[in-house]
Amino acid sequence: MAVQEHIISLLVNNQPGVLSRIAGVFSSKGYNIRSLCVAETTNPEISRITLTSRADRDFTDKIKKQLDRLVDIISVTDLTDIPSVKRELMILGLRVREENRQEILRAIDLFGCRIVAMDADYLILEVTANTDKTVAILKFFEPFGVEEMNRTGAIAVFRQSPS
Amino acid sequence: MKTKLNFHKTMGADIVLKVLAEEGVDTIFGYPGANTLPLNDRMAESPIRHYLMRHEQAAAHAADGYARATGKTGVCLSTSGPGATNLVTGIATAYMDSTPLVAITAQVNSDLWGKDAFQETDIIGITMPITKHSFMVRDPNQLESSLRKAFHLARSGRPGPVLIDIPRDILGPVDNGNPRDMPENAPLITDDASSLARIAEALNRSERPIILIGGGIKLGDACARATRFVLEKRIPFTSTMMGIGSITSANGLNLGFIGTHGNETANSVIHQSDFILALGVRFTERSTSVISEFAPLAQVAQIDIDPTSVGKNIPVDFQWIGDIKDALEALSALVSPRDRPAWDQRIEEERTNRASRNGDDGCGEAGALIRKIQAAMPRDTIVVPDVGLNQIWTVRTWQCHTPRSLITTGGMGTMGFSVPAAIGARVGAPEREVVVICGDGGFYMNIQELATISSYRLPIKIVILNNGHLGMIRQMQDLFFDSRFTTSALGGAVDLVAVARGFGIPAERISAQDHAEEAITRMREAEGPYLIEALIDQDNYVYPIIPPGKSNVEMISGKDGRA
């Protein structure tokens, strides 16, 4: 079966131990969580968890049923094939040399990244994009000397109003 | 130290006891510790009866046995730390067989929590994969609602164990002037009736249908309805080990149970079927053997209350999620009884064929002894086998005539289950006789519970089938490891009759063939508990058996590997 990256969006009660139960479902069924984002929603009693995992097609059905069984989970949605806006944040620490400075600055402009901090031979770059573009940007800058990199993993919202 | 009453505050312990009573609990099985003391102290004024076990594992098994015998939710209580961790095997056993159970653990004082205090352990974390849910009560205002929610969760949908961890200070004087409600319970999912109509249509069309009964029939309290359905529609049925006894009237439609140690007829017939109506079944490998070779010609319709069980282990052609009683009611109107002479004849041939080759059910003298025990006991006796050969001998020979007459650990296969589970069963059903059929290995694992039986004078009848070995391990070594018998001999150094008498339980030793009837009569007529140690030959195995990695129709009936 075709293995693909799934992006799952969960609404959960904002309680201690909930994340541990969710992680337990993934590990006990042999799935790896590739990225994970947790934050409170507009209602402080409810959190949204967005996570990604690589798996075959029947993953959604199996994992959704298992997650639905958890008492503190309010809803589970697989956004993989649903029109939605997906973004992640990446911060890059990049070595800059005199001979490639111009090329780097042009690329930053072209990719629509933001420079957060900069000195003569080092700059910190903020990238907000979907995962594919994030990966492409990282790939582009790697030959210049990426000293540090950190990514949040994807978050997502429905393209249409969920109601 | 006596807990001082503060009249401006409520005792958390009283809240616990009040909710238990309101949830219909009159019996709990437990073992005290420093952190349960505020609760134990208040029991003096409560109508709830606390059975003092001799080990927390036994408290969990007893609550499990109580629930299986009564259909009510079992409750066990332990202290923090080792008390709580000792419950783990019992909770896992209940989880695997979906028993409604509420486990209450006391925790160290809230202000000590997270400091590795004396007898502190993260029991919520430890039990997460083996509970339906768990609650750590952090606020007295949540005590009542957490308890109520625990009972609701334990028995709703697919039942199972729920753990509630209560710090000692919250059992003491607390201010709960502002009780908090729990969020609403999510409604259970039920599929609409159209999929049942499709299932009925496919069943009506099928030429070689079979019904597969699982543990969900008992859990869903649907034994009577399922029996009626089978008899009305005249469809042959088989069951998993957990489903044995759900359809109680012995009639020509029962093919026995399927799986590794199942009946040959059942395994062979389900293999040839073209349609399986699976009711409350989760298709574990113990039932299906090699999944890819299970019932290769059959369409499968699976009906279950738990969406996660449907299509989990085998692909299904039809499914319906919801209450089994509703499903049976709807199907009653939709399925038409039909003559299928060719199928009937095939099944009859299978039966005759197998019967002539396996007249003793493959259980040897041990099976014959179990039949004698059943013949001597009342029809509605509850039998509680342990795990190992004794379990298979029992489920293959004991005829269940009434619901809830077989209590066995099917999913977890927990050795040492039988004696404490029998305590729970007898406490829950004092009007019924309870017989334990145990091997010597499993008997040693909760032998301390003889003291519980003895001190409460529970008239439980215990038969130990003593072959001096871990018999099932020995059989597998004999068949699949070139008869190299390592680590499976228990020996005969222990005088189990003297042990039982030491615990205050009358006992005698017999060999399986000689004087069994007289001993069984004495056991039946004994007012209180009674123990028989029956010496069984070490080569008395169970046949047929499916070798590892083989399908349900590759059973072997002897050491030479013949089918």
Image: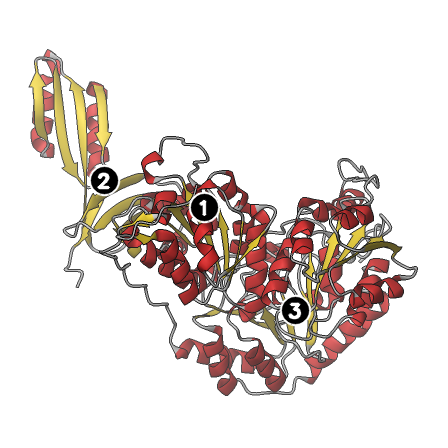
First in sequence, mark 1 or 3: give its number. Answer: 1
- Residue count near mark 1 (Cα–Cα under 10 Å), binned few <14, some 14–19, many ≥20: many
Chain of the residue where label 2 is placed in the rendered structure: A
Same subunit: marks 2 and 3: no
Tell whether B332 sits left or right of B461.
left
Chain of the residue where label 3 is placed in the rendered structure: B
Which secondary structure, mark 1? helix
Q: Are marks 1 and 3 in contact (CB under 8 Å)?
A: no
Q: Is residue B204 above or below residue A151?
A: below
At 76% from the left and 40% from the top, the residue drawn is B488
Tell whether A41 sits left or right of B156.
left
Cα distance between the residues tagged 1 and 2: 56 Å
Q: Are marks 1 and 2 in contact (CB under 8 Å)?
A: no
Cα distance between the residues tagged 2 and 3: 58 Å
For residue A131, which numbered disc appears in the image? 2
Which secondary structure, mark 3? loop
Q: Which residue has dot 1 on it? A: B37
**Image quadrant in which you'd find residue B556:** bottom right
Residue B307: x %, y % from top left:
43, 63
Q: Are marks 2 and 3 in contact (CB under 8 Å)?
A: no
Cα distance between the residues tagged 1 and 3: 36 Å
**Image quadrant in which you'd find residue B215:** bottom right
- Is A109 in front, or is B148? B148
Q: Which kind of residue does numbered mark 3 sit on?
A: Ser
Q: Which residue has dot 3 on it? A: B405
- Is B191 in front, or is B550? B191
Q: Which kind of residue does numbered mark 2 sit on?
A: Thr
Chain of the residue where label 1 is placed in the rendered structure: B
